[in-house]
Amino acid sequence: MTGRLLIVHGPNLNLLGTREPAIYGPATLEDANEVCRAAADAADFAVDIVQSNHEGALVDAIQAAQGTAEGIVINPAAYTHTSVAIADALAAVGLPLVEVHLSNVHAREPFRSHSYVSPHASAVIAGAGIQGYRFAVEHLTALLRD
Ligand code: DHK
């Protein structure tokens, strides 16, 4: 393996598959994780995957990536729009970062258009469903390779 990525899923993403499928799609979190593993494997990268409904646990996971991962893919879910702590943790570790949203957050309620995370991301992917994770991993691994 060339390297290692951390994949971070925020609150309520454990409910994918049953949660508002008209918005988030029919795929489960395990389906999304499989997309990440396959894309990472194709680029010769390994993945660590974390999902939590708790802001502090997500901060801990991001901090722990320093020294263990070379890049982060994160869907901070609702914390995208509220969490200075998660944005600060991402800035602190300073790893190449891609932000993913399953839905097109810009076509939804206005509060979803603001992200505390985006200023720290090299790319933001929204509205592509779980394939967004594939695009994110492909982009990040290419960035790390070049
Ligand atoms: C997931 C959530 O849980 C929402 O709170 C965000 C994001 C959008 C998504 O589209 O993946 O607003």
Image (tube, grey):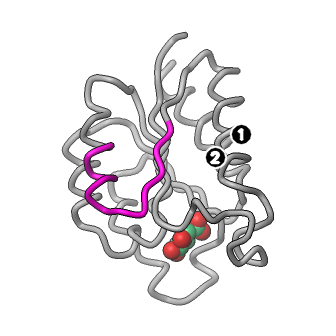
Q: Amino acid at mark 1?
A: Val
Q: Which residue corresponds to the image point at 26% horizontal and 58% vertical from the top-left?
A: 56
Residue 74 relative to residue 65: left or right:
right
User: Which label is found at residue 133?
Assistant: 2
Q: Position of residue 65 (x, y in %)?
A: 32, 33
Q: Position of residue 12 (x, y in %)?
A: 53, 68
Give the position of the N terminus as an image quadrant: top right
- Residue 102 vs residue 61, the one in the foreground: 61
Q: CA distance from mark 2 to mark 1?
A: 7 Å
Q: Secondary structure at mark 2?
A: helix
Q: Please, which residue is most extreme toward the top here?
A: 1
Residue 92 relative to residue 90: left or right:
left
Q: Marks 2 and 1: which is nearer the front?
A: 1
Point out the quarter of the image occupied by ligand 1.
bottom right
Q: Which residue corresponds to the image point at 58% horizontal and 78% vertical from the top-left?
A: 106
Q: Which residue corresponds to the image point at 50% horizontal and 29% vertical from the top-left?
A: 143
| Label 1 CB sits under 8 Å from any ligand 1 atom | no
Q: How many marks?
A: 2
In the rendered structure, which segment of residues is drawn in magenta? 49-61
Q: Quadrant of residue 111?
A: bottom left
Q: Residues within 10 Å of mark 1 (few under 14, many from 20)?
A: some
Q: Position of residue 50 (x, y in %)?
A: 46, 44
Q: Amino acid at mark 2?
A: Tyr
Residue 34 relative to residue 45: left or right:
right
User: Which label is found at residue 35?
Assistant: 1
Callout 2 touching callout 1 (CB < 8 Å): yes
